[in-house]
Image: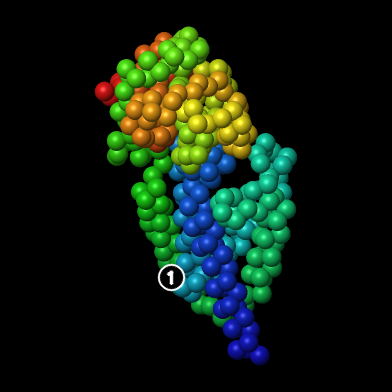
Amino acid sequence: MLNKNKYLSHTIRIFIGCVFIASAILKYISIDAFDVYIYEHQLFNFAITATLTRLLIATEFVLGVLLIANLCIRFTYVVTFLFLIGFTLYLCLQPLLFDVDINNCYCFGDKIMLNHTQSIIKNLVLMGLLLLVNIRFYHKRKYELAVFIVLTLSASTAFMLIDAPDYIYKKIFRTEVRINTNIYEKALHKTTKYDTFSSGYQLICLYSTKCKYCKIAAEKIDRIIKQNQLAPSHVKCIFWESSDSTEIKHFFSENKLVPLDYALFSIGEFLAITNGKMPVILFSDKGNIIRSVNYTGFSEKDITDFLRQKPAKGSVVF
């Protein structure tokens, strides 16, 4: 009987460890969407949000590894149980406190979608399984807290570097995009939108409706505009002409974006302007392009300062 209980405890421990690791990895694969989801809670700015999401993922990953590896089990058992209790309470209070989508809690990123109720049930099942683990089979080790902290900080550092938050990424890598301003000016003149696209401070976003990273940039800009109560009229879009009105409407609705004014360029003009790169975000001051960056090259502060008429530093790269 004792051996059966021990076998059951080991099986449950390994199973929960696998769930935690899978949850961490799938969140990390969907990190851009997860960042936006947490940012929508309106608790922190985008930079702090992106840091905290990676710390959360690292903690979840380390708990899973410790459970599977049978390390620091007594300490890990308590932390895992508290972790599940905390997130279950959050899910119970979420509809009352936050105006966010409850159709996917992002427990497994955007790869396995669990709604609000399913996530609560999942946590209750995991807590029930944890209660079946006989903690007496596991010895308390020295320095368990220190081991946990070191591993979590190491994992956090790794996750911060592998897929760095934008505020770190743009300090390490080149995020400016070379654009052809002459073709841009000529193409814009051909449309009926030249005056509206050239007045005041504007973000001009060159998107493709099929581009994954365009959707990420559009979601991020949309949430920043909403949270900081900026006027959507200061953000414009440019698509290429193969995108019909239905595709463009779907682009906005699918990603829950405020519909924006947009212009259409020919495919040749679009690609000549961006050199085939997309998305490209232009910071336009009365029609003068003062910055052109990719989807990782702008921060929340860049956008808010610029649209509140505090131009972001930098100049267009020719």
**Position of 54 relative to 312 (above/below):** below
**Position of 20 relative to 13 (above/below):** above
Q: Quadrant of the C terminus?
A: top left
**Position of 73 relative to 25 (above/below):** below
Give the number of callouts.
1
Please report the residue visible at 41 percent of the width from the left and 64 percent of the height from the top: 147
Please report the residue visible at 29 percent of the width from the left and 39 percent of the height from the top: 172
Report the residue marked by disc 1.
142
Q: Quadrant of the N terminus?
A: bottom right
Please report the residue visible at 73 percent of the width from the left and 53 percent of the height from the top: 117
Residue type, mark 1 in image: Lys
Please report the residue visible at 54 percent of the width from the left and 25 percent of the height from the top: 225
Please rate how many residues cluster around mark 1, counting C-alpha atoms within 10 Å: few if below 14, some from 14 to 19, many from 20: few
Residue 311 visible, this angle: no
Where in the figure is residue 92, as x and y percent of width and height?
Answer: 72, 49
Colour theme? rainbow
Where in the figure is residue 160, as x and y percent of width and height?
Answer: 39, 48
